[in-house]
Amino acid sequence: MSASLDEIIANFDLLEEWDDRYRYLIELGKGLEPLPDEAHNETNKVRGCASQVWLDARRDAGPGPQTVLHFRGDSDAHIVRGLVALALAIYSGRSASDILTTDAFETYEKLGLSAHLTPQRSNGVRSMIERIKADARAAASG
């Protein structure tokens, strides 16, 4: 089962050393719901990530901006898989309008991740978030 965003933030607060925080991110990634083989496809592949990342979006019926999106994701890199888990904790299960107004970078900043990710990983996180927001924009417009 995946951790909630509140749990993740609380656990990050308890961990003072960055090695421990990285290990925790890896554990979060291990807790992701497995992405079926057929979802590891070109459509779900996130462009702009150095590692391979896949995001699969499912919509619950709802009127445009109130459509709820559920995401599953995977990566071939352990830390990135943890970053996927964090992005899903922030966005999955929320309405398209909530997704579009939520700034994940505030959470990354609060957790101290912005200062501890390589520029390449930061670009990958941006690509993941942009992909999630693009899915939300598509859902919101019908």
Image (cartoon, helix red, strand yellow):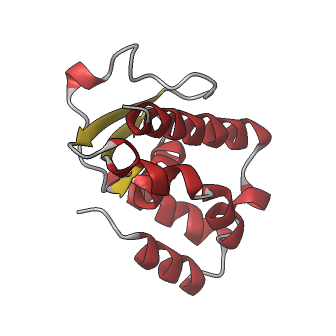
Image quarter of the N terminus: bottom left
Q: Is residue 87 visible?
A: no
Measuring 25% from the left and 35% from the top, which residue is drawn there? 35
Measuring 41% from the left and 78% from the top, which residue is drawn there? 7
Q: Please say if 28 is above or below 64.
A: below
x, y percent for residue 139: 38, 36
x, y percent for residue 5: 44, 70
Q: Is residue 63 visible?
A: yes
x, y percent for residue 6: 44, 78
Q: Please say if 56 is above or below 98.
A: above
Image quarter of the C terminus: top left
Corner quadrant of residue 47: top right
| Side (left or right) of 96 relative to 2 | right
| Side (left or right) of 33 relative to 130 | left
Corner quadrant of residue 113: bottom right
Measuring 64% from the left and 25% from the top, which residue is drawn there? 48
Q: Please say if 40 is above or below 5.
A: above
Measuring 65% from the left and 82% from the top, which residue is drawn there? 16
